[in-house]
Image: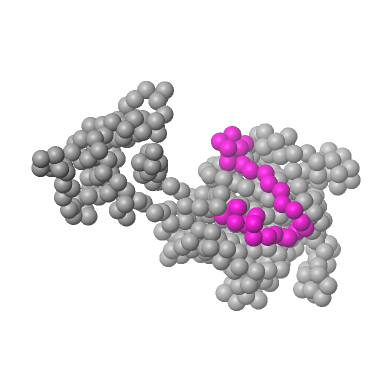
Amino acid sequence: MSCFCVGVKAMESYDHGRLYLPRLDANVMQRRVDQCASHMLSACASRTSTFHFHSTIAKMLHLLPISTLLLVTQVIASPLARSDSKPLPLLIWHGLGDNYAADGLHSVGDLANETNPDTYVYYIRLDEDAGSDRTATFLGNVTEQIAQVCDDIAEHAVLSKAPGLNALGFSQGGQFLRGMIERCGDRIKVKNLVTFGSQHNGIAKYQLCKDGDWLCKGYIGLLKSNTWGAWVQGHLVPAQYFKATNETTGEPTEEYLESSNFIADINNERVLKNVTYAKNLAALDNFVMYVFEDDTTVIPKESGWFAYTNTTSNEVTDLRDRDIYKEDWIGLKKLDEKGGLHFKTTKGGHMDLGDKVLKDVFKTYFAPEKTLWDGIVDEVQEIMEL
């Protein structure tokens, strides 16, 4: 109670039992509020751990004289008493055959802003021209593309100054965002990563192209002809997250480990491990992986959870039963142990995604965090209503 007595009692004056609350300069009020909060937090910290923080505050407030409680109410009503933190900027990386300027992608950004007002949305692009950006989803070196995105974000006027970022990846954009975090985590501080229908453990078959999509069909033809060739691995994007395994043992093939330009590297599957990858990914607050229940585009769909699926027997080996987890090659085990690894499913086929699921993601993982003072103010308000 000394916190309020020292910080607030001096503001009280009595005249024959009548209370006067003098008008205060806003800066003086804020300074006294800050001093009060600091003293109260110190007092709470010094108590034994058997007392709950909110319980302590409640007891302290119930002991206050009515004059002080009236002043607390005045303080709460002031906009200075709240710290309305803005949501972190949101990165969105689209999938194969899409582009950063697509209406559907921007409707997702609009929904993010509707759910968490003032969200700054950045649509990751590899070229300012939408057509060229779409072409880059098929044709390009993924390692170079991620390096470009890292530089773009690190040099961005808004993103580079943010205290952290949230990230949303659709299909291949999900594993590219993860690769960005693993490789550039020292420069780009992503707090929460959510992926939908991504291929975190690679793909066993190339996707079918839509009728009339000759760009897709042309590239898929090249992919099938020479997946492990140097030119294909350095230029055709889906080949760089294609994974070949021994159907009997489930182990990756030697040609995959030797030639894969992207997925074998960011999954730390080679003998020599990059410990920075594990450190950076484990630093996330949350890594949320959505798999579409009826996905027939991503084969196997369980790749979205880092699971291994034997395409002959359809037997699935879950992530926690695999060496990548048990030996913590990329930090997933550490992330899981602190409660930051989440496995989710959503109905429908690949990228068959509704607003309800997205809103839930935005509210649960991308909403602004309350400050400690926000929590105290909420607690005071609840007590005052009793």
Residue at 56% across / 49% down in the picture? Answer: 364
- Residue 103 in picture, x, y percent from top left: 63, 72
Residue 356 is covered by the magenta coloring: yes
- Residue 228 in picture, x, y percent from top left: 78, 57
Question: Is residue 244 placed above or below 214 in the rendered structure?
Answer: above
* Left or right: residue 20 compared with residue 77: left
Residue at 35% across / 51% down in the picture? Answer: 82
Residue 246 is covered by the magenta coloring: no
Chosen colour scheme: one colour
Residue at 71% across / 65% down in the picture? Answer: 96
* Left or right: residue 290 compared with residue 37: right
The reply to whether residue 141 is visible in this rendering is no
- Residue 308 in picture, x, y percent from top left: 77, 43
Q: How many numbered callouts?
A: 0
The quadrant holding residue 59 is top left
Quarter of the image with the N terminus in it: top left
Magenta region, residue range: 333-362
The quadrant holding residue 99 is bottom right
Residue closest to the eye, 226 or 158: 158
Question: Is residue 373 placed above or below 88 in the rendered structure?
Answer: above
The reply to whether residue 385 is visible in this rendering is yes
Quarter of the image with the C terminus in it: top left
Extreme residue in the right direction = 312
Residue closest to the eye, 366 or 198: 366
Residue at 10% across / 40% down in the picture? Answer: 16
Question: Is residue 282 placed above or below 347 in the rendered structure?
Answer: above
The quadrant holding residue 124 is bottom right
